Image (cartoon, rainbow, N blue to C red):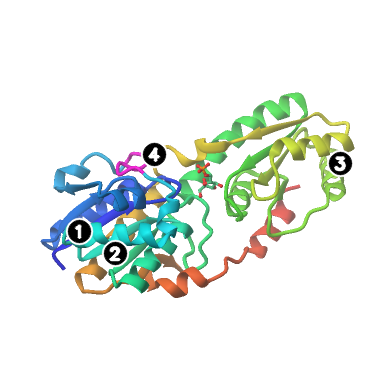
Amino acid sequence: MKRIGLLTSGGDAPGMNAAIRAVVRTAIYYGMEVFGVERGYAGLIEGQLIPMEMRSVSNIVQCGGTRLRSARCMEMLTKEGQEKAVETIKKNGIEGLVVIGGDGSFRGAKILSEQYGIPTIGIPGTIDNDLEYTDYTLGFDTAVNTCLDIINKLRDTMTSHERVSVVEVMGRHCGDIALYSGIASGAEIIVVPEIEFSIEDIVERIKRSRANGKHSNIILIAEGVMSAEKFATKLQELTSYDVRPTCIGHVQRGGSPSMADRMLAAQFGNRAVRLLKDGIGNRVVGIRDNKIIDMDIIEAVSMKKTFDRELYETLQMISM
Ligand code: F6P
């Protein structure tokens, strides 16, 4: 393989730039040319390609966002859009493609592989950590660290005023950001889509913690359940403690990637290009049990994400 394409798609995630760098540098190491596709699949459909050199990726390892920019592209779900994307690939002599993105982006990659025979490798780039085949997705660690920073600050003011803080985090239908941020920040309660909750039980837990000498409470709610504002209103009706909602929002998608995400980016990017160099496509890369892995893209996208109940129980036991 002599020329490959590279795009970032869907919601951006910290570490995407570090992955772009790893892909470009590994490809150049093997004597391959790289074309960066701007604006994800939208740019592929419209033919927005830029040649990438060694120096195109200088000084980006530490930057959040994605230099190639990203888009959520509905046209890629249509036959017409897919055919235009394939035309760009063929016209520019691109023999393989690296797609950095989440679940939706992988579905596009699967179509290009399966239906059009374009060797494609997926790199899991999303803060949501909602892909079952990999223990971690790129950007999750940084997003959780951003949440921790904000939750620490909220704890200061909530304790001063003896309040209950309801904090909404992202994750789409997945509760991992809430789970990990909850354990690592010492939040008393997490509310996630994967586990049913009772607001009365939550009120009881707050009461018990106050009886045990706590001066504030942090409740993390995953966006897939409901908004912090709605939950705080419901809770306020049932308790005399002062409740305040905070939605962290898109802040958790930005910022310089953590060491963990930079390490993943380097290894994912490197493995993706090595697969293409060996003529292997239709795979996704990931990490399992601390080892970089790759697996069939069709199998990977068909796996249903499971929730770590043991971690959830750990939080229940230690966050009182
Ligand atoms: O997939 C990443 C994510 O940030 C989700 O957690 C969230 O639900 C969604 O994207 C928000 O999308 P947008 O930035 O398009 O509003």
The span shown in magenta is: 62-69
Q: Is mark 2 on a helix, strand or loop?
A: helix
Label 2 vs 1, first from the N-terminus: 1
Report which residue position mark 2 lands on: 272
Q: Which amino acid does label 1 sit on?
A: Thr
Q: Main secondary structure of the magenta part?
A: loop
Q: Few, some or many C-alpha atoms within 10 Å of disc 3 (few <14, some 14-19, many ≥20)?
A: some
Q: Is residue 39 left or right of residue 232?
A: left
Camera-near label (3 vs 1) is 1
Camera-near label (2 vs 4) is 2
State the residue lying farthest toward the left: 31
Q: Residue 207 carries which label?
A: 3
Report which residue position mark 4 lands on: 256
Q: Does the residue labelled 2 lie within 8 Å of ligand 1?
A: no
Residue depicted at x 34% and y 39%: 63
Place of residue 227 in the rendered image (x, y in percent of width and height, measured from the top left): 69, 40
